[in-house]
Image (tube, helix red, strand yellow):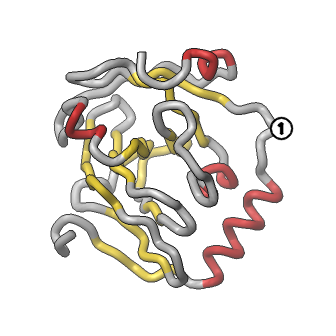
Amino acid sequence: MTATQARARSVGGALAITGLVALAMDSPEGVESCTVVSTPDGPALTVAVASTAGTRSVGLSGRDSIPHGGLLLEWPAEGRHPIWMADVRFALDLIWLADDGTVLAVLPGADPCHSAPCDLLEPDGSRDSRAVLELPEGDAQQFGITPGARVAYPPATPEACAAGGHS
């Protein structure tokens, strides 16, 4: 990854502690929500949704596999939403999305971080994102997810999780 692909900053223990505190204060009530993402060149993907500070902070950390077809991290407003790969066990394609589903930036094959400090990943063009879609490595290219393309997804519901992964 070159400097033009992503700007990285070190993450220290303070961010990890902040994330754990946010998780403790802002966890969902044990109900997983999902949505179905339509991709430009591929199937519809059922993905889990992380829409609270706690669930976004944890993301895919510590998991042995990717739930459903991926994970969508959503924020309540557009802005800067860098991602960290702390304790993630597999490489991911990271896709920053605008509010209307336009793909702002793609970081293919982002490597996990196995020891602190972990870098924050924030590619050029991702500054006004509202969501980040995390997919298995290679899926972004396979499904035609490139900057400028559009994906669509309805609001998340627990019922959408029953649909599975790729449909």
- Residue 149: percent from left, percent from top: 20, 32
Q: Quadrant of the N terminus?
A: bottom left
The residue located at (51%, 60%) in the rendering is 89
The residue located at (55%, 46%) in the rendering is 65
Residue 115 as seen in the image, left or right of residue 43: right
- Residue 147: percent from left, percent from top: 18, 42
Kindly identify which residue carries mark 1. 29
Residue 78 as seen in the image, left or right of residue 47: left
Among the 4 quarters of the image, the one containing residue 32? top right
Residue 20 as seen in the image, left or right of residue 29: left
| Above/below status of 22 relative to 72 | below
The residue sitting at the front extreme is: 64
| Above/below status of 48 relative to 25 | above
| Above/below status of 63 relative to 45 | below
Q: In the structure shown, which secondary structural element does the residue marked by tag 1 occupy?
A: loop
Mark 1 surroundings within 10 Å by alpha-carbon count, few (fewer than 14), some (14 through 19), many (20 or more): few
The residue located at (22%, 34%) in the rendering is 142
| Amino acid type assigned to the residue bearing label 1 in the image | Glu
- Residue 15: percent from left, percent from top: 61, 75
- Residue 48: percent from left, percent from top: 57, 34
* Between 141 and 34, the one nearer to me in the picture: 141
Q: Quadrant of the C terminus?
A: top left
